[in-house]
Image: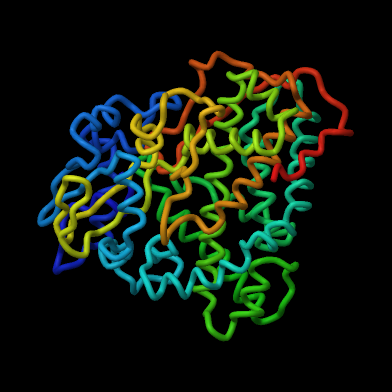
Amino acid sequence: MTPLLLVPSRVGGRIREAALRLAIASARRLPSRGRALFERDGLDPVAALEESRSRGDVVSLLRLPGTRVWLVNGYDAARVVLADSESFANDVRHLVGRQDRAPAERIGGLGMTDRPDHDRLRGVLTPHFTRRRLAELQDDIDRVVEAALDDLAAHGPEVDLVARFGFAVPFGVICDLLGLPDVDREEFRRRGAARFDLRDAGSGILDTAAGTRQFLIDLVASERRSPHLPDGLIARLVADHGDDFDDVEIGGLADGVFLGGYETSASMLSLGTYVLSRSPETWAMLRHGEPAEVDRVVEELLRYVCPVQIAFPRIARDDVTVGTTTVRAGDIVVVSLTAAGRDPTHHVDPQRFDPTTASAGTLAFGHGLHRCVGAELARMELRTALVGLARRFPDLEVACDPADLRFTELAIVYGVEELPVRLGALRTVEGCQAGPAS
């Protein structure tokens, strides 16, 4: 399970880091309904997660000393919990180890803060993700996508789409957004791996996360001493808020942007392409469709794929009723975004990918106070990248037996390890520019 969720015991009112690591190490030994939050059957929820619906939209996941963990699997109940920042707290830092460790090793971020800290931190980021600011990024996104498409063509006719497109596009976009110099990008890429992977008992999560945060904290400190970074988020945050925020806070904000915009978008692009390869009509729609049609494809992909499997866990501040279930003060509530997106009461045929019936209100980016600040940027990336891919390679197909594909297991962010594709006939570069779909 996620290290923030299944902590086995309290010691002196606090949960020590040893218990946190033990919780991660125990992930493979969890009951099936606990593991089901981080497993899938291909692209579908596993049977144990689907079976939980028969017991209600809010079901008991397991008991811990002095508390209970609840699973929310219904769409409506999920929206209620995610939107209710009065009844539920996100700040679980007091539960997950000492805060006297090195700053880069502490657990934190927007997803684990409550008001007023959350508003203070998010208020710094929001101006950089307005519609106007994002429109300024479209040219950069176009350039990154075109470079990745050129790289695919150069390494074809068969190529791993995950490495050369799925990861290449969001990594290039996020580096441009942050304003990372080219010389720092390879080191940044190396440190960004394995942050969501619970395989091998999740041994790399804590150390890798600390390494990435320290890299960014050091970059902020260097920028503060001697401004040198290209115009980007880090340089702007230091220039505009350097007197109000220290290096750890600004580095943490940059890390949150990276965390939310890299691995998740990479999984969406790779898994989305796999889904689209099985839907020729939708692939054609991306090439020739109107912006509104492309938008429906993207929204349906977000619902159907939803790579982020759970939302940040919540802790009930007081006794609260969700649906027909009473959650007691101190109980932990986990929302399965995977299950909520496949709720049959909210979607006509939830196990089927069908852009013609795409419904609004995806929970793939969360909901309420903690909704992903970069949600619209992610949509821009998906529209531009998928349209560009479909136009450049209209005959693209998966180059292996789907049964041989290896998907991530026990991962907070779900993905595919490799996606060998056959590019097919190559369209000329002219006319392939994707551009914004809306």
Residue 145 or 218: which is nearer the viewer?
Answer: 145
Residue 94 in picture, x, y percent from top left: 27, 67
The residue at 51%/22% (across/down) is: 405
In this view, 28 is above or below 234: above
Which colour assignment does the render follow?
rainbow
Question: In which quarter of the view is residue 286 placed?
Answer: top right
Residue 147 in picture, x, y percent from top left: 78, 41
Tell me the quarter of the image containing the C terminus.
Answer: top right
Question: In which quarter of the view is residue 351 placed?
Answer: top left
Q: How many marks?
A: 0
Residue 120 in picture, x, y percent from top left: 47, 75
Tell me the quarter of the image containing the N terminus.
Answer: top left
Residue 34 in picture, x, y percent from top left: 25, 38
The residue at 52%/80% (across/down) is: 245
Question: Which residue sits furthest bottom?
Answer: 243
Residue 306 or 418: which is nearer the viewer?
Answer: 306
Residue 338 or 239: which is nearer the viewer?
Answer: 338
Residue 37 or 94: which is nearer the viewer?
Answer: 37
400 left or right, relative to 9: right
Residue 308 seen in the current view: yes
Residue 212 seen in the current view: no
The residue at 26%/49% (across/down) is: 23
In this view, 42 is above or below 292: above
